[in-house]
Amino acid sequence: MRLTIIAMMILLGTTANSAGLFSWLFNSGKEITAEIKLVNKCQLDSKYFIVRDLESGKSASFANGFAKLTTKTKSSIQLQLSPSVKNVTFAGNAVAAKKKMKLVADCSERNLNEVSKN
């Protein structure tokens, strides 16, 4: 076991990478407050987006392009539209939570679809 960890550190090369590896191995599931920056490439105002923890169901709104969400490291979080937005869907990718992160809202035709033409 010890030899495996040393070998992994050597393969990764730098102290920064090995520190990141140890953090990933031993801090998975630790409760954090994720600070999420929204990069909005959509014609929708940022106030219409939320970030949701897919495991707990908790969500947070964006204010001035930032949201804070209490979650756990490595929990799956996803950028979504607020439930108040009707007739439109947005398919954001689920990503692993970390303390500081950036999510991109890209409303190209393949991501933003009209659901109903009523």
Image (cartoon, rainbow, N blue to C red):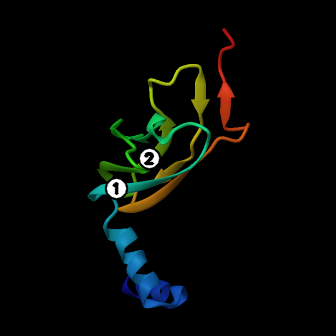
Find residue 47 and report its horizontal and vertical position in percent: 44, 38
Q: In this view, does 52 lie to the left or right of 104?
A: left
The kind of secondary structure element at disc 2 is: strand
Q: Where is residue 29 in the image (x, y as percent from the top left)?
A: 31, 57
> Residue 4, can we see it?
no
CA distance separating discs 1 and 2: 10 Å
Residue 108's spot in the image, x, y percent? Answer: 71, 41
Q: Are marks 1 and 2 in contact (CB under 8 Å)?
A: yes
**Residue that protrudes farthest toward the right in the picture:** 109
Residue at 67% x, 38% y: name it.
111
Amino acid type at circle 1 is Ala
* Residue that sits furthest to the top in the current view: 118
Give the residue number, with chain letter if any, for mark 2: 77
Depth check, mark 1 against mark 2: the one in front is 1
**Front in this rendered view, residue 23 or 11:** 23
From the viewer's side, name the closer residue of 21 and 94: 94
Number of callouts: 2
Q: Residue at x 44, y 47 (%)?
A: 77
Which residue sits at x=60%, y=25%?
Answer: 88
Residue occupied by mark 1: 34
**In the picture, which quadrant includes the C terminus?**
top right
Residue at 41% from the left image edge and 54% from the top image edge: 36
Residue 115 sits above or below residue 40 on the image: above
Q: Position of residue 1 (x, y in %)?
A: 38, 81
From this view, report whether residue 116 is shown above or below residue 99. Answer: above
Give the image quarter of residue 82: top left
